[in-house]
Image (tube, helix red, strand yellow):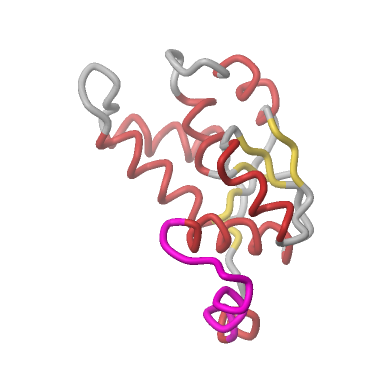
Amino acid sequence: MTPDSSAIVAAFAAWHPVHDRARRALRGVEDLVAHAELEAYSVLTRLPAPFRAQPALVSEYLRRRHPGARLVLPAGPRAGLIDDLSQSAVSGGAVYDALIALTAKRNERVLVTCDERALSLYQRLGVSVRAL
């Protein structure tokens, strides 16, 4: 199991509507998709006050709660990713959702998400998903 950025943000942020559920779901999950980690860090450190977190706090949280591997899409599958996305009519911000999903799939992980918008894309790409 590995989370997308929406699940990482929810698990971190006590104010998030599914915070408790996300924290429970991600307990013991060590490995993160590298891009999901970067997205979550970006979101958490740029939110408007009072929700914005200090970069050092987010960094420490990610390192301590998820100390395992940072999963990436290997060079082979990555080389054809743009063609695959265009054939599947994936564009705009959904490209990053697809990158995270396909990385989880390639690494044989169930993707945990709080993102209802991305859920249909994840399913269309054949990714095993657990929605919170």
Q: Nearer the viewer, residue 86 or 47?
A: 86
Residue in view at x 63 percent, y 48 percent: 31
* In this rendering, position of residue 52 left or right of residue 77: left
Q: How far from the left and from the top, in percent, is residue 41?
A: 37, 42
Q: How far from the left and from the top, in percent, is residue 132?
A: 68, 27
Total numbered badges shown on the rendered structure? 0
Q: Which image quarter: residue 103?
A: bottom right
* In this rendering, position of residue 34 left or right of residue 80: left
Q: Which quarter of the rendering shows the N terminus?
A: top right
Please say if 6 is above or below 108: above
Q: Nearer the viewer, residue 57 or 99?
A: 99
Q: How far from the left and from the top, in percent, is residue 57?
A: 33, 29
* In this rendering, position of residue 45 left or right of residue 62: left
Q: Is residue 121 magenta?
A: no
Residue furthest to the front: 89
Residue in view at x 59 percent, y 32 percent: 114
Q: Which image quarter: residue 45?
A: top left
Residue in view at x 64 percent, y 54 percent: 121
Residue in view at x 75 percent, y 52 percent: 109
Please say if 131 is above or below 128: above
Please say if 47 is above or below 94: above
Q: How far from the left and from the top, in percent, is residue 71?
A: 60, 60
Q: Which span of residues is magenta-colored?
A: 80-93
Please say if 42 is above or below 100: above
Q: Nearer the viewer, residue 40 or 32?
A: 40
